[in-house]
Amino acid sequence: MTDVTGTSNPGTSTTNPGRAGTDPGPAATPPAKSAWPANAAHQAAVARLQRAYAEIPPGQPVRLAKRTSNLFRFRDASPSAGLDVSAFGHVLSVDPASRTAVVGGMTTYENLADATLRHDLMPLVVPELKTITLGGAVTGLGVESSSLRNGLPHESVIEMEILTGDGRVVTAADGNSHDALYRGFPNSYGTLGYALSLTIELDPVAPYVHLRHFRFDTPEACMEAVAQIAQDGSLSGHRADFVDGTAFSLDEMYLTVGAFSDVAPWLSDYTEDRIYYQSIRGPKEDFLTIRDYLWRWDTDWFWCSRAFGVQNPVIRRAWPRRYRRSDTYRRLVALDRRYGLSATLNARRGRPEREFVTQDVEIPVERGAEFLRFFADRVGMSPVWLCPLRLRSGRAWPLYPMRPGQVYVNFGFWGTAALPPGGADGHYNRQIEDQVTALGGHKGLYSTSYYSEDEFSKRYNGAEYARLKHEYDGDGRLPTLYQKCVTVE
Ligand SMILES: Cc1cc2nc3c(=O)[nH]c(=O)nc-3n(C[C@H](O)[C@H](O)[C@H](O)COP(=O)(O)OP(=O)(O)OC[C@H]3O[C@@H](n4cnc5c(N)ncnc54)[C@H](O)[C@@H]3O)c2cc1C
């Protein structure tokens, strides 16, 4: 066990096993109870937070005081100070022997990946944006190119230490007395409680990822290839440790299949002049270090950095490298939203108003081509990100009802679309919600939603949510999921 915050035991470090992915390796065993954050500083921080929470007067809104966020709901700054959770922003320990880590709930994946890569290990799913936190990805769901193999981030959580809405600190794990909370925490968005530390499984890595970009000229052919990869674990003989895709148009879409590799004849770098999403169009093959692979999308926030001119070579060179990051761009968007800068500029130029269409949706692979055709026809934004996924476990997670065994494709689109004359906010997002429902899919809740309360309850298992809310936040100190994700408070 290595205590990342201090002492280490060199005797337990592991060697790189060569490659991961298809190698199931020894099953991760939950660490013994003594491996729980025995760390005195952590225990003291938990006690402090519990006291601070108890001191918030009933009826006063509760919020996390966090430096970063990846939510796409921009609300006026809250007058309340917020709970100081800075003590929960680091990795408590990594155990190469059991391939597990104990991690503060507000630890960013950037810091988490750095701590585990030192041991040639990584979390089973690492979302693309550096400042997404482990707690945020578990309570708000996450997906990445290992999700076809490894499911969603919460599926490799062994246990969680949670400050519940009613002020208790409980340990929720599969099969223990808080099993219902463990299963209902994903997609609860911090409305049942806050994860203070989580024990997670880790996967071995190789030093490099060998990428191949396969082109498709119809959505149908692309979706058939996804289904084939799901069945075979490879495409044209290239092992699919990772798979995601980029649709530039209905006749130009790519699946990028990544295989762990011990060797790299060359290495690309997309943090300088070259831009990752543009590289997908050719050449067909590429190599990245595992760390650069994990953050390949962050430097340009997928393609969204183009809105700030960062893809113009002159501006790019002048833009300090340390600010070529998704959190910088998100802060700029938040400022723009707060002061209405682009809306004012648009209006002055006599251009139509624009609606934010920033969403991730999951559609069964058999209906994926229909979704892409609908989206190109009705919304027309491009590119669109494609990420195949399948639940890792045979049991469903109640608040985000994906079917075990079913292959889904996550479609991500992040930007704005010009409203037609007379069109109001919600014009595009409502159509997308309806189409997602019609195709048997689900929508992530990190952005705007327009569902009625009744519809929302049907989509996200309102009955189970109500039961959990009663059990863990009976006095309703935290908002409900509907209030938080749909109602603009
Ligand atoms: C443009 C864009 C692209 C995205 N792309 C992806 C993607 O490709 N893959 C992916 O996985 N996700 C993606 N996301 C979604 C992102 O993973 C979720 O928004 C996630 O919830 C953000 O986590 P965060 O740590 O930044 O949390 P925050 O944004 O700070 O918080 C999110 C919510 O979780 C709650 N919360 C935060 N920490 C905790 C905790 N420890 N315990 C309980 N509740 C907590 C907060 O109260 C809040 O309601 C994207 C989001 C955007 C805006």
Image (cartoon, rainbow, N blue to C red):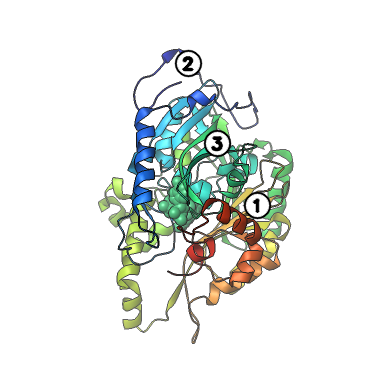
Query: Dot 1, crowdedness within 10 Å: few (<14), some or many (≥20)?
Result: some
Residue 380 higher or lower than 129, as above or below: below
Badge 2 or badge 3: first in the primary sequence: 2
Disc number for residue 159:
3
Query: Dot 3, crowdedness within 10 Å: few (<14), some or many (≥20)?
Result: many
Q: Position of residue 36 (x, y in %)?
A: 48, 29
Instruction: Pick the residue in front: 161 or 237.
Output: 161
Q: Position of residue 230 (x, y in %)?
A: 70, 44
Mark 2: amino acid: Thr
What's the distance in space between the residues labelled 2 and 3, CA to CA? Answer: 23 Å
- Relative side of 109 to 452, left or right: left
Badge 2 or badge 1: first in the primary sequence: 2
Residue visible at 65% across and 49% down in the picture: 397
- Choose top left, top right, bottom left or bottom right for residue 246: bottom right
Label 3: element kind: strand
Instruction: Pick the residue in front: 326 or 34.
Output: 34
Query: Dot 2, crowdedness within 10 Å: few (<14), some or many (≥20)?
Result: few
* Residue underneath mark 1: 398
- Choose top left, top right, bottom left or bottom right for residue 177: top right
Badge 3 or badge 1: first in the primary sequence: 3
Mark 1: amino acid: Pro
* Residue underneath mark 2: 12
